[in-house]
Amino acid sequence: MKLSNLRRIFCGFIAGAVVAAIVPVIAKTVEEQITVYYKDIKINIDGEPLDTTGAEPFIYDGTTYLPVRKISEAVGKNVQWDGTTNTVSLGSAPGTTNNLFDIMQPHASNYCKIYSGNDKYNFLGAERKNCAKFDDVSPYLTFNFDGKYKELTFETGMNNYGGVLEIYADDVLVQEVQTPGNQPPKKVTVPLDGVLQLTIIPTGNFYVCCCWDMQLR
């Protein structure tokens, strides 16, 4: 999503509270009356119309304000409101831990299937959630973190003969996780301070490699 669109979405948080053409706006300790304009503004996401009933967009001082919750849910992002700091967070709030695939989808992948939401994958005798399953030849999984996160944690296992999980941060190998086949899973922690892009590559004689409970902080 373009930065300009994100700015509009953040500004649009106010729209959920709008019930009349003239509404109060609270900015820190200042309260003032403003006049806003409704023009039956329609929102399309990937060509599909968004229902904005109860949170209609409006125009104020030449800027169009959009309902942040409606839009964030439509694009698959969690939205959180912190009343102590008056902060809206889309996806992961600073300092919190969230399921990776609730926050973002891979930038690129090969022979990798993602299980997120209610999707589960049975691996090593248990149902795995928030999961990436690798198989076949030359699998990999790449995310663009853009230096915004602190840490990625997950568990991983391989069946058959096992192998090695290679983890690259900005094209530099930072971890090699030895994963014997059909053995108890291993917990992996990857520091992300300043990391723009992370790539996970399973290698070896495995038939299926799985990474699950992937948490981003």
Image (cartoon, helix red, strand yellow):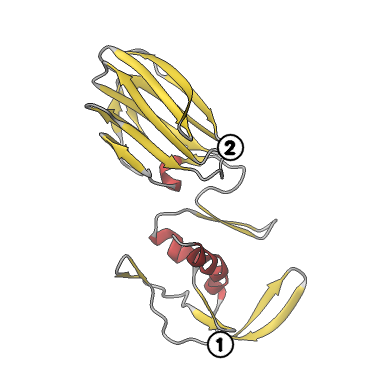
Crowd class of label 1 (few under 14; some 14 to 19; many from 20; radius 10 Å) = few
Total marks drawn? Answer: 2
- Earlier along the polypeptide chain: callout 2 or callout 1? 1
User: How far across and how far down the image is residue 157, in percent?
Assistant: 36, 20
Figure check: 110 above or below 204: below
Figure check: 78 above or below 110: below
Q: Secondary structure at mark 2?
A: loop
Between residues 205 and 68, which one lies in front from this camera angle? 205
Query: Could you tell me the amino acid type at mark 1?
Result: Ala
Q: Secondary structure at mark 1?
A: loop
Residue ranking furthest to the right = 29
Q: CA distance from mark 2 to mark 1?
A: 43 Å
Residue 116 visible in rendering: no
Residue 150 is labelled as: 2
Residue 194 is labelled as: none
- Judging by the rendered image, the residue that carries numbered circle 1 is 21
Q: Residue at x 31, y 36 (%)?
A: 120
User: How far across and how far down the image is residue 185, in percent?
Assistant: 40, 18
Q: Quadrant of residue 201?
A: top left
Residue ranking furthest to the front = 171
Q: Residue at x 29, y 32 (%)?
A: 121
Figure check: 79 above or below 179: below
Q: Quadrant of residue 206?
A: top left
Q: Residue at x 43, y 46 (%)?
A: 102
Quick one: quadrant of the N terminus?
Answer: bottom left
Query: Could you tell me the amino acid type at mark 2?
Result: Lys
User: How far across and how far down the image is residue 104, in percent?
Assistant: 42, 47
- Label pair 2/1, CB-CB below 8 angstroms: no
Crowd class of label 2 (few under 14; some 14 to 19; many from 20; radius 10 Å) = some
Q: Quadrant of residue 154?
A: top left
Asked if residue 125 lies left or right of residue 98, the reply is left
